[in-house]
């Protein structure tokens, strides 16, 4: 099986990847899920703040890695951006249009430009559909497949692009391995010619020997088609490999965002530092010399996040101010942003008694 | 150190409707007292079946241990009756599993689950066992242990449940702890807590550990020796530094090459292992890695190489000499300083 392909030119015209055009702009995005009690009369007794005010830009052609521990809101972020959930607050401006503020017809048209690849290649494909109808379905939904014959041709082309044999078109998902199923998911996402793909842990369910196949495929497709990725993962080694920039999430918020190399060489946020130090490195010599920052305790519930900095219950460097106020997401230079009082010069309190951060 | 357990030519099969699954195909290895041995390999390579066979936890039928010996402290575990085995399981050999939720009883309190084993194996009374349970929970770092004893498993987080499993595993001072992917379901920061905990407990209590994982990074920080499994065979075996420094089996080499490393600069391109592992219902007579192996020669297709000693401390099951092959093509990579 190969990951290279030669005939992708007719799928989409390759684009320049200079990363200087904003494709997607996420502003103060919030996604709160209501917690309800009562069987007949449901009353809301609280809310899960799965995503609680995040802001970032995504440049055309780049890969932004989104990392963080289970339950911190990565998938919810991806889904809220694609409007698979209706965000509680905030704006998602994609190719110039605020997706939270357009009618359903316009949204449907925009959906063609944005696709998602899911974590679990076993659960995400309908077991009763053939590979042909799985990959062809988006063509039908968006009525862009042309005649039956044209559609079939297009599906076979897509299978070839993702390194699957086009003769597999009439087979069912259970006849494929995990890595092959993930390729089917990728082919389906590519069917409508998207410019932006949310990859939600696309390799987590795969064996290490197969993961590299799918990573290489995603990289090839990006350089050939100029795709933009939001790459969600909890494996920081993989994220470092594939991303241009990386955002670290903790309990519904982005705590640090930086260029890939900058983040790994000069992590500023205490959580990022702990996260990086926890990643095991497959080299006994290196491992012997490493000093781990072992965090105490677990991630608090997103239904009751701590007041102040939401990392203060586990932070090795917590200060008094961290329990009272929330640090702002400050640019410390060249687009390296961090939300932590260690880097947030507090100069004055405003009338409400809130500290006012002075941007560096 | 003396050998604590000696596994000889262990072979386990499953007799299913579709045919015989050749899950473990004659594996031989030793674990010394106090030693940590890691077993790595991709899913389905026989890691779990291999260790569950040691204490006969294989569902029979369809499973059957068709061959082999497991010598533990002078007796062959495969020849013991169920009662004799029960004296060893959970007592001298303890096991912790990947998913603590399925291995904890959801309707019993955490405290009861620990005290039960203590009362059974160590003949403690209620009070003694309760005191010891608190001690154990404190040992594995559960805050406010006395108060948490009456909680149910669902009231604990994933990391805390895994700690409870470890506390239970350690409750009878085992000589051997078998851990089957105990951190796979956990986040890296929690994984670091657990690895740290187990290493600390081992240096205090001195038990031997068999740690199954597919994460080569975890192995590097934890193990003395590593066994690499593929298609039910051990294909490479030796001290962890030696194996990682210069792998001598193409599968081990392929694994190390295919994973991105946090401490290296962007590798130009990952080198995947192409293809898939063989179907264990119909295993080939050739070397099982041959269809995916970049070093394959004619002999590989004719004869499956046995695990052969290539030095005093290591063995490999391969016909080809890889001693000159470099793992990382460092010339092409922009190297960056190791992370802190
Ligand atoms: N539909 C929903 N209703 C209520 N709560 C939800 C819903 N979806 C997610 N949540 C909650 O929101 C939080 C964030 O979930 P999310 O799935 O985004 O996490 P994640 O970072 O993707 O985690 P993982 O790494 O485990 O996939 C969690 O506490 C989760 O339980
Ligand atoms: N109860 C069972 N019935 C049939 N086949 C089984 C059973 N348990 C395991 N196997 C098969 O044995 C092989 C080895 O499995 P296992 O040891 O669980 O792999 P892993 O290395 O992932 O732990 C696999 O092919 C698996 O499908
Ligand atoms: S703001 Fe305070 S508690 Fe939060 S990460 Fe920084 S130092 Fe730690
Ligand atoms: S014996 Fe041959 S096919 Fe098998 S791993 Fe060695 S070189 Fe590859
Ligand atoms: Mg998720
Ligand atoms: Mg297993």
Image: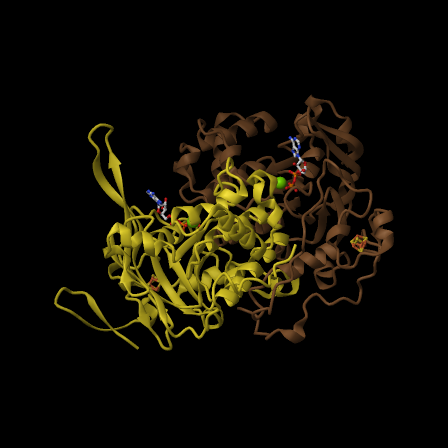
Residue pictured at 67% horizontal, 51% vertical: B275
Task: Give the colour chain A carries in the figure.
Answer: yellow
Q: Quadrant of the N terminus of chain A?
A: bottom right
* B166 lies above or below B76: below
Between A231 and B195, which is closer to the camera in this rendering? A231
Q: Quadrant of the C terminus of chain A?
A: bottom left
**Can residue A291 be seen in this snapshot?**
no
**Can residue B261 be seen in this snapshot?**
yes
Between B329 and B300, which is closer to the camera in this rendering? B300
* B20 lies above or below A20: above
Residue pictured at 53% horizontal, 48% vertical: A184
Between A295 and A100, which is closer to the camera in this rendering? A100
What colour-coding does the image apply? by chain
Q: Position of residue A306 (x, y in %)?
A: 29, 52
**Image position of B247 (left or right of A123):** right
Q: Position of residue A81 (x, y in %)?
A: 34, 55
Give the chain ID for the brown colour.
B
**Image position of B211 (left or right of A230):** right
Q: Position of residue B118 (x, y in %)?
A: 56, 30
Residue reaching furthest to the left: A351
Q: Position of residue A241 (x, y in %)?
A: 54, 65
Q: Quadrant of residue A171?
A: top right
**Image position of B234 (left or right of B172):** right
């Amino acid at each position: 099986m190969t990951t290279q392909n030669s005939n992708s030119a007719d799928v989409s015209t390759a684009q320049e990847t200079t990363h200087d055009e904003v494709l997607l702009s996420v502003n103060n995005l919030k996604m709160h899920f209501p917690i309800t009690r009562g069987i007949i009369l449901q009353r809301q007794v609280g809310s899960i703040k799965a995503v609680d005010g995040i802001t970032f830009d995504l440049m055309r052609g780049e890969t932004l890695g989104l990392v963080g521990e289970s339950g911190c809101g990565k998938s919810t972020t991806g889904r809220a951006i694609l409007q698979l959930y209706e965000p509680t607050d905030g704006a998602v401006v994609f190719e110039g249009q605020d997706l939270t503020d357009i009618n359903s017809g316009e949204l449907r048209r925009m959906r063609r430009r944005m696709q998602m690849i899911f974590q679990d290649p076993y659960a995400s494909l309908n077991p009763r559909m053939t590979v042909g109808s799985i990959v062809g379905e988006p063509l039908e939904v968006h009525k862009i497949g042309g005649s039956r014959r044209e559609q079939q041709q297009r599906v076979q082309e897509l299978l070839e692009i993702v390194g699957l044999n086009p003769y597999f078109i009439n087979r069912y998902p259970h006849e494929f391995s995990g890595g092959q199923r993930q390729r089917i998911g990728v082919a389906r996402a590519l069917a409508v010619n998207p410019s932006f793909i949310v990859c939600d842990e696309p390799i987590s369910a795969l064996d290490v020997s197969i993961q590299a196949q799918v990573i290489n495929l995603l990289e090839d497709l990006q350089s050939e088609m100029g795709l933009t990725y939001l790459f969600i993962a909890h494996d920081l080694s993989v994220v470092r490999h594939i991303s241009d920039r990386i955002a670290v999430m903790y309990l519904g918020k982005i705590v640090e965002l930086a260029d890939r190399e900058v983040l790994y060489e000069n992590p500023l946020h205490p959580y990022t530092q702990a996260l990086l130090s926890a990643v095991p490195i497959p080299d006994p010599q290196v491992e012997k010399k490493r000093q781990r920052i072992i965090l105490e305790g677990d991630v608090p519930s997103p239904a009751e996040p701590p007041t102040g900095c939401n990392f203060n219950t586990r932070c090795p460097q917590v200060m008094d101010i961290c329990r009272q106020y929330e640090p702002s997401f400050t640019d410390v230079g060249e687009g390296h942003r961090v939300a932590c009082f260690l880097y947030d010069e507090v100069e004055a309190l405003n009338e409400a008694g809130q500290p006012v951060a002075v941007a560096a | 150190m003396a050998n604590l357990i000696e596994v000889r030519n262990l072979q386990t099969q499953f007799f299913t409707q579709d045919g015989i699954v050749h899950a473990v195909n004659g594996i031989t290895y030793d674990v010394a007292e106090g030693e940590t041995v890691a077993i790595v390999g991709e899913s389905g390579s026989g890691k779990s079946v291999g260790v569950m066979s040691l204490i006969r936890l294989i569902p029979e039928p369809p499973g059957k241990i068709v061959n082999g010996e497991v010598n533990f402290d002078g007796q062959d575990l495969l020849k013991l009756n169920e009662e004799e085995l029960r004296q060893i399981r959970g007592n001298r050999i303890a096991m912790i599993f990947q998913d603590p939720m399925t291995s904890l009883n959801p309707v019993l309190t955490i405290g009861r689950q620990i005290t039960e084993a203590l009362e059974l194996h160590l003949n403690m009374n209620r009070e003694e066992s309760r005191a010891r349970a608190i001690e154990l929970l404190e040992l594995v770092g559960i805050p406010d242990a006395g108060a948490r004893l009456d909680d149910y498993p669902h009231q604990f987080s994933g990391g805390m449940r895994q700690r409870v499993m470890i506390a239970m595993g350690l409750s009878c001072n085992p000589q051997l702890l078998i851990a089957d992917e105990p951190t796979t379901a956990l986040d890296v920061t929690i994984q670091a807590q657990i690895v740290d905990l187990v290493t600390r407990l081992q240096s205090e209590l001195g038990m031997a550990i068999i740690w199954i994982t597919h994460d080569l990074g975890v192995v590097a920080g934890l193990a003395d020796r590593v066994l690499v499994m593929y298609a039910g065979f051990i294909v490479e075996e030796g001290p962890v530094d030696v194996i990682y420094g210069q792998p001598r089996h193409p599968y081990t080499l392929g694994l190390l090459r295919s994973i991105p490393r946090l401490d290296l600069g962007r590798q130009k391109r990952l080198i995947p292992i192409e293809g898939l592992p063989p179907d264990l219902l119909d295993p080939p007579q050739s070397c099982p890695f041959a269809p995916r192996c970049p070093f394959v020669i004619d002999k590989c297709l004719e004869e499956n190489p046995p695990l052969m000693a290539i030095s005093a401390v290591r063995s490999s099951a391969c016909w080809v000499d890889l001693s000159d092959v470099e793992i990382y093509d460092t010339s092409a990579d922009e190297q960056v300083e190791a992370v802190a």
